[in-house]
Image (tube, grey):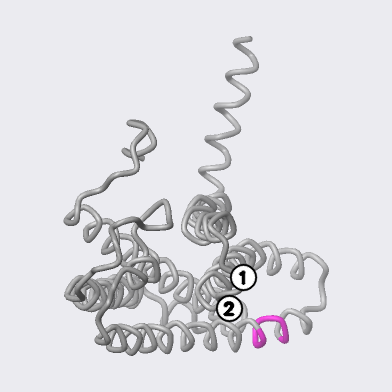
Amino acid sequence: MHNSLWDTSNISYTGCAAQLFFFLFFIVAEFSLLTVMCYDRYMSICKPLHYGTLLGSRACAHMAAAAWASAFLNALMLIANTFSLPLCHGNALGQFFSEIPQILKLSCSKSYLRELGLLAVSGCLGLSFFVFIVFSYVQIFRAVLRIPSEQGWHKAFSTCLPHLAVVSLFLSTGIFSNLKPCSMSFPSLDLALSVLYSVVPPALNPLIYSLRNQELKAAVWRLMTGCFQKH
């Protein structure tokens, strides 16, 4: 945002490290919290009688703390290793923000293999989240198909589909951006994919976190009708 407002493309070494740390921290926290939300939907639809006992305030606090802690440790580990690598291929990043693949392109050290190993560990963590989400939604859809009433179907799908849409967008663009072959690597494509997985899912968070809240919808409706009446 600072670079855009001041029409500059420069960033300090420390600023680049800080930017990458917060990017990794929030992107992993986002995925972790989406996984926690999937578990919440699984419990509410598949095991509604146990929902109150298994997902009390203490359990929710523990899951949120685990999500933030895993994101912090993962970001710290990757940052410490990335910025310990010597950079000798210039200082121009082919991206609008600091990103690990772009920084590794500037490295001339064979120790970048260690970084790839750490990225593989992070990938395994993300894969475990992905498998859990897929398994949960398989169980959710099996439970929904057994609901006899159309109203029950509508309620279940309206709860799950916004979350599923954000997860699908987040994973598909993130995976394709980082695992696509080098022959498909173009600056404009890399930029568009990075925006899709780093900007769009967080921007859609109000949809899946808040817009099903009846009090919030009532407040928005009062605000809108008040504006129309004034005009």
User: Which residue does the image show at 58% across and 78% down from the upper left?
Assistant: 181
Q: Does residue 166 sit above or below 229 in this rendering? A: below
Location of mark 2 (residue): 181
The N terminus appears in which quarter of the rendering? Answer: top left
Quadrant hosting residue 32: bottom left
Inspect the magenta stretch and tell me whether residue 140 lies in it.
yes
Inspect the magenta stretch and tell me whether residue 84 lies in it.
no
User: Which residue does the image show at 68% across and 62% down from the upper left?
Assistant: 158
For badge 2, the amino acid type reads Pro
Closer to the camera, 184 or 25? Answer: 184
In the orientation shown, which residue stands out farthest toward the top? Answer: 231
Instruction: Name the secondary structure under disc 2.
Output: loop
Q: In this rendering, would 200 be left or right of 16? A: right
Closer to the camera, 210 or 155? Answer: 210
Q: Which residues are magenta?
A: 138-142
Q: Does residue 103 sit above or below 143 in this rendering? A: above
Q: Residue 77, position in %: x, y?
A: 22, 78
Q: Determine whether label 1 and label 2 are within 8 Å by CB.
A: yes
Label 2 crowd (10 A; few <14 / some 14-19 / many >=20): few
Location of mark 1 (residue): 184
